[in-house]
Amino acid sequence: MLPYVGKWTLIAVLIAALSGTASAFFLFALDAATNWREAHPWIIWLLPLAGFGVGWVYLKIGSSVEAGNNLLIDEIHDPKKVVPLRLAPLVLAGTVISHLFGASVGREGTAVQMGGALADQLTHVFRLRHDDRRILLMAGISAGFASVFGTPLAGAVFGLEVLAIGRLRYDAIFPCMVAAIAADQFGLLWGVHHTHYALSGMAPVNLWTLAAVLLAGMLFGLTGMAFAKCTHMASAFMKRHIGYAPLRPMLGGALVAVAVYLVGTRYIGLGIPVIVEAFQQPLAPWDFAGKFAFTVASLGSGFKGGEVTPLFYIGATLGNALAPLLHLPFSLLAGIGFVAVFAGAANTPLASTIMAIELFGPQIGPFAALACVVSYLFSGHSGIYHAQKVGLAKHHSAAVDEKRLPPAGD
């Protein structure tokens, strides 16, 4: 075991250094872009031109990496060739531009793609075989996720869990764990500060509370499934009716800009201030629907970024809206929704539960675990990552459909 541990410790730390540094630079650039946009709100009218520019660059030099997260997952399932390094700068620039001009996108996709692309460059350096390259890419995914959110344990498990529904790759658990923990530390060394979400209320673990959380988990799962399906449908619709790729984000950008003119800027960008508000006070019950619509329009038309932070927004505000109906504290149900909608949309209940504990403290653990598992069950076998395989049906009543599900990865 000593040679194995030594080899993967070295590789994982190198991955962490590359990914943690890239994520730190990305987060600083994202903050600068967000601050500039908020100080100059007129820039939203240039969103269609920004979308056209990003689409044109990807058409000319980024067509081989446009699949993003799904490209990494496909390469892990069926290794063919090293992910081109240009994926990292393209998705970095595309995401920062999307945020600068006011699209509603996230950040996890960018960090994960940068982590995977940078990690895969080590394939040549260490002359890794296909099996080792799979582990390398998984460690890159873990490092990117951990460093952008400041959740190392959730990042490690996310890299193991996201590949296939119902199956974990334990052969990668050590590299993913080391890469995630180290990447988070590298980000902190660069001066990254992650948002703190404070729970101001907690509920006892009793029959009513568990029943309320179970019901909320069902709704979170259905919301996650609806988000994934709507995003894929919007993307397919745009591709089917608009043949020239740069025109898709141009049209989507025009739609978002007009919507901002009508309803304001509350639903664009990351939306971190609104998420923080969801833990502190009652919000408008339609906030989750507003973010849902803006994000589907942005991602479905081709803007770059990620889905996870918008899912956090949708989940936290939906939890906030459900809290008085279920007689639970606002902050508690906002925290549960924060992770549970993501758990359903990404089919990652374990990573989501661990994330809740890392972000909000251990006291939320039982509630988050129940909600994330129920959300996972109720979100069906779809998800935000269409390259994700089905290793095992979520429940026995779905077994009759397993033959029609995509085959599990190795």
Image: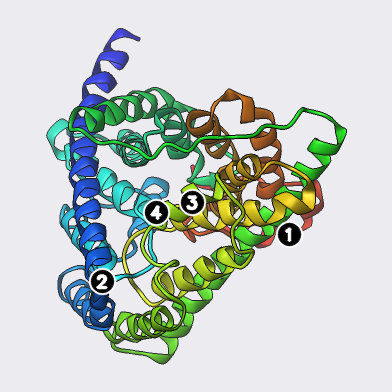
Location of residue 16 (image quadrant)? top left
- Say if mark 3 contacts mark 1, CB within 8 Å: no
Query: What's the distance in space between the residues labelled 3 and 1, CA to CA?
Result: 37 Å
Q: Is residue 399 left or right of residue 330?
A: right
Mark toward the start of the polypeptide (1 vs 2) = 2
Residue position marked by numbered label 3 in the rendering: 275
Reading the chain from its start, which is encountered first: label 3 or label 1?
3
Q: CA distance from mark 4 to mark 2?
A: 31 Å
Locate the N terminus and report the quarter of the image it occupies. Answer: top left
N-terminal-most mark, 3 or 2: 2
* In this view, 202 is above or below 214: above
* Total numbered labels placed on residues in the image: 4
Depicted 141 relative to depicted 12: above or below: below
Give SS at disc 2.
helix
Q: Residues within 10 Å of mark 1 (few under 14, many from 20)?
A: few
Q: Is residue 117 above or below residue 201?
A: below
- Would you name the residue on which mark 4 appears? 74
Give whichever of 307, 232 is nearer the camera: 307
Q: Secondary structure at mark 4?
A: helix
What mark, if any, has residue 401 been given in the picture?
1
Report the residue marked by disc 2. Answer: 101
User: Where residue 249 appears, x then y in whole percent?
Assistant: 32, 79
Mark 2 closeness class: few <14, some 14–19, many ≥20 residues within 10 Å: many
Q: Amino acid at mark 3?
A: Ile
